[in-house]
Image (tube, rainbow, N blue to C red):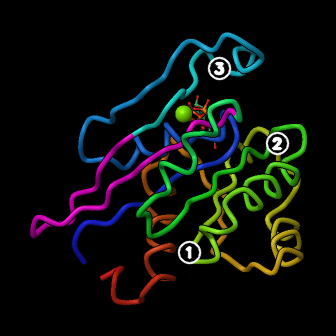
């Protein structure tokens, strides 16, 4: 493989910026700004344009990691950022009011990309709120005709985020994960 691009998306606070920082081999380029609205209650900063990080694979090859803003008012970036991507990592925050609503919203929004490429799904903040369980996410995804790799992850843990990336690469092509 040569240079490939993966996109992290999901709602505000799901851990997109954190996840990219956990696995990037370079200093992550962030566009975090002070949150000026409701988001502020959850955390002080939010992505307004994109995150960019990179995993070096050796032999000059790399996986480029792009993170979208979670806030819908920046959704003009979503299309731009998926361009040329090989796969999507959807992060969902289990502690949000209605994580299934988030799941449906992001799958519907990115559906054209998901249908052409691959997706893996990570559920964060399960330590904060244990319900719903992964099996319930499976059921929701199945209703949408999808059966992606699905894990509970903590975006702060490198091994958790790597699991999501590896699952995505394996589902694209078993040889890519080598
Ligand atoms: N307790 C707990 N905290 C987590 C977990 N995963 C991520 N976090 C924290 O949740 C917050 C996530 O913030 P960001 O990474 O900025 O989230 P984001 O998805 O980039 O959000 P926007 O850019 O605003 O859309 C950070 O403070 C992380 O440390 C988890 O599994 N459990
Ligand atoms: Mg962010």
Indicate the secondary structure of the residue bearing disc 2.
Answer: loop
Query: In the rendered structure, does residue 172 fall within the stretch colored magenta?
Result: no
Indicate the secondary structure of the residue bearing disc 1.
Answer: strand
Q: Is residue 91 left or right of residue 96?
A: left
Q: Residues within 10 Å of mark 2 (few under 14, many from 20)?
A: few
Q: Which residues are magenta?
A: 52-71
Q: According to the image, label 3 marks what residue?
A: 43
Q: Earlier in the sequence, mark 3 or mark 2?
A: 3
Q: According to the image, label 2 marks what residue?
A: 129
Q: Is residue 7 left or right of residue 141?
A: left
Q: Residue at x 67, y 48 (%)?
A: 124
Q: Earlier in the sequence, mark 1 or mark 2?
A: 1
Question: Can you tell which mark lies on residue 45?
Answer: none
| Front position among marks 3 and 2 | 3
Q: Quadrant of the C terminus?
A: bottom left
Q: Are marks 3 and 2 in contact (CB under 8 Å)?
A: no
Give above or below for 128 relative to 92: above
Q: Residues within 10 Å of mark 1 (few under 14, many from 20)?
A: many
Residue 11 location (% of width, % of height) = 70, 41
Quadrant location of residue 176? bottom left
CA–CA distance between discs 3 and 2?
17 Å
- CB at mark 3 closer than 8 A to ligand 1? yes
Q: Residues within 10 Å of mark 3 (few under 14, many from 20)?
A: few
Q: According to the image, label 1 marks what residue?
A: 118
Q: Is residue 70 left or right of residue 158?
A: right
State ligand 2's quadrant.
top right
Indicate the secondary structure of the residue bearing disc 3.
Answer: loop
Give above or below for 21 relative to 171: above
CA–CA distance between discs 1 and 3?
30 Å
Number of dots carrying numbers: 3
């Amino acid at each position: 493989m040569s240079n490939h691009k993966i996109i992290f998306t999901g709602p505000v606070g799901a851990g997109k910026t954190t996840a990219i920082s956990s696995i990037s081999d370079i200093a992550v380029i962030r566009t975090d700004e002070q949150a000026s609205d409701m988001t502020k209650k959850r955390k002080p900063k939010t992505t307004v344009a994109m995150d960019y990080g990179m995993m070096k694979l050796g032999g000059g090859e790399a996986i480029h990691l792009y993170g979208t803003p979670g806030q819908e008012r920046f959704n003009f970036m979503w299309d731009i950022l998926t361009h040329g991507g090989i796969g999507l990592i959807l992060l969902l925050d289990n502690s949000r009011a209605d994580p299934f609503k988030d799941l449906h919203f992001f799958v519907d929004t990115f559906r054209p990309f998901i249908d052409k490429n691959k997706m893996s799904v990570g559920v964060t903040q399960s330590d904060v709120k244990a319900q719903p369980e992964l099996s319930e996410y499976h059921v929701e995804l199945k209703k949408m005709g999808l059966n992606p790799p699905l894990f509970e992850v903590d975006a702060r843990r490198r091994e958790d985020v790597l699991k999501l990336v590896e699952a995505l690469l394996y589902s694209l092509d078993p040889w890519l994960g080598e």
